[in-house]
Image (tube, helix red, strand yellow):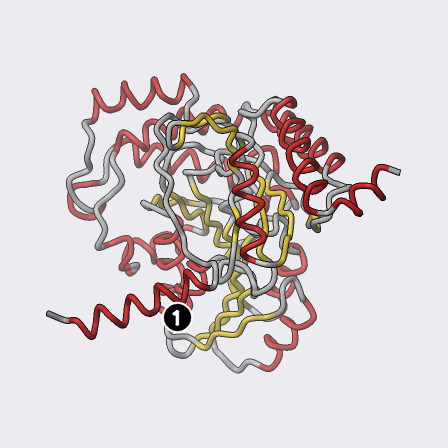
Amino acid sequence: MATTLIAGLDSALDARRAAGLTRVRKAVASPQGARVTVEGRELVAFASNDYLGLASDSAVVAAARDAATRWGVGAGASHLICGHFAPHEALEEELAAFVAPCVRARALTFSSGYLANLAILSSLAGRKSAIFADRLNHACLNDGALLARADFARYPHGDVAALERLLTASQAPRKIIATDAVFSMDGDLAPLPRLLELADAHDAWLVVDDAHGFGILGEGRGSVAHFGLASDRIIYMGTLGKAAGVAGAFVAAHPSVIETLIQTARPYIYTTAPPPLLAETLRVALAIIRDGTGRRAHVTHLIEQFRRGAGGLPWRLLPSSTPIQPLVVGDSRAAMDIAEALREKGFWVPAIRPPTVPQGTARLRVSLSAAHAAGDVAALLAALHSIAAASFPLVARVDAT
C-alpha cells in the first residue's frame, strides 16, 4: 500500500482543516431557484449565479424537454468529428449577432468558460508572447496563460497605469491583455475603455471574460456593450450557465480569431461537444435575455435595496453595481461562522475564503437574482443585522442612534 503517499495527502488535508479552509459540498435536492432544499431544509438561496432566474424558468425547461425528444441527450463526438449539430450552428450565429464585439463577429460554443479561456490563450499566445492579467482575474485566465507558456505578468487590480508600464517595457511580438469584465468575488467592473485604448496603443489583443456580465449588463449584451465598445481586437468570452441559466460558454470575436480556435485550440478540438439539446435550450434562454428588460430592472432594484440596508453592518460592503454583493469579514473562520448562523436562520450565503480571495479578505458573497422578491432581500438584511447585533453589540447600538 502507498501509505506514505496517503499520509502526505492526509497531512495536507489536516492543515487545510486547521486553517478553516476545508470545502464541503452541499447536495441540493430541488431545482435551482430563490429557494432550494438542502439537507432536508428549505433555504432562501443567495449563492447562485442564476442572475435572471432562468435555470428553472418554465419556458426554458419546456425547451429542454422538447429538445431532448428531438435531438437526444448527447453529442456523441467532438464538434470536428460528428458532434456539431444544427442547434450549435444556430446558437453561435445568434450569439455573435447579439453580442457583436466587432463587425462581422463569429461565435464558437464550448462546454465551459474554463475551457473557452484555456482555448483562447493557448491558441493565440506562445513562448514568444506576453500576457498581461489583472491580479483578481478568474483562475481559468491564469491557467490559460500558464498553458500558453507565454511571459505572464499580473498587474494590481484595476491599475491601468501599472499595466501601461508593463506593456511599454515588453518586447514581445504578440501581446494579450486578459481581464475579467465583472470580477466574480468583488462585483466591480474592469476599466474596459482604458484597456482597449492600451490595446490599440500597444497592438495587443484584449480578452474579456464576461462570465458575470453577459445577460445583465448592456441590455443583456454584456460588459463590452455596456461601455459602448467594439473592436477587432476584442475577444469576448461569455458563459451560458449563469445569467443564461443553462450550461456552457462561447467566444465571440473577429472571424479570423474564431477560425484559429477551430483549427488549433486543443480544448475545443479534443472535447466532446455539448449536447445539442443544451444549444437548442439556450436559444430560448437567449430570446428571454434579449427581451429581459423587466428581469434586469428587478435585479437592479434588489441591488439598490440590499446596498441601502447593508450600510449599517460592521462588515465592509465592496462597491458593486452588479448582482454580486460582497461583505468582507476578513477572518476565514469568522466568515464561516456568519454563514453558518445565516443557515440556521434559513439563508444560504456562501463564505468565500483564500485562495479564491486574497488572504485576510474572506467574505460573504451575496448573489441576487430576478427570482428573488424584495421580501427575500429584506429578510436577509434583517438576519444579517441580527447576527451583527449579537456579535458586535456596541456597533449595533451606535448604528441605532
Q: Which residue is mark 1?
A: 146
Nearer to us in this view, 50 or 162: 50
At x 57% / y 45%, what residue is drawn? 365
State left or right for residue 104 relative to residue 223: left
Residue 224 locus on image (x, y percent): 59, 46
From the viewer's perspective, tell me whether residue 86 is left or right of residue 398: left
Is residue 54 among the parts visible in the rendering? no
> Which residue shows up at 46% across the image and 38% down it?
242
**Of helix, strand and loop, which one carries label 1?**
helix
Q: Compared with residue 215, is residue 69 higher up or lower down, i.e. above or below?
A: above
How many discs appear?
1
Residue positioned 67% across, 59% down in the render: 194
In which quadrant of the rendered view does residue 119 lie? bottom left
Rendered location of residue 358, percent (x, y): 56, 63
* Residue 220 in picture, x, y percent from top left: 56, 34
Q: Amino acid at mark 1?
A: Leu
Q: Residue at x 32, y 69 (%)?
A: 11
Can the viewer see residue 22 in this picture?
Answer: yes
Quadrant containing the C terminus in the rendered view: top right
Where residue 367 sits: x, y (%)?
A: 56, 38
View extreme (left): residue:
1
Q: Nearer the viewer, residue 345 or 186?
A: 345
Residue 218 image-quadrant placement? top right
Does residue 382 appear to the left or right of 21 in the view shown?
A: right
Position of the N terminus, as image quadrant, is bottom left
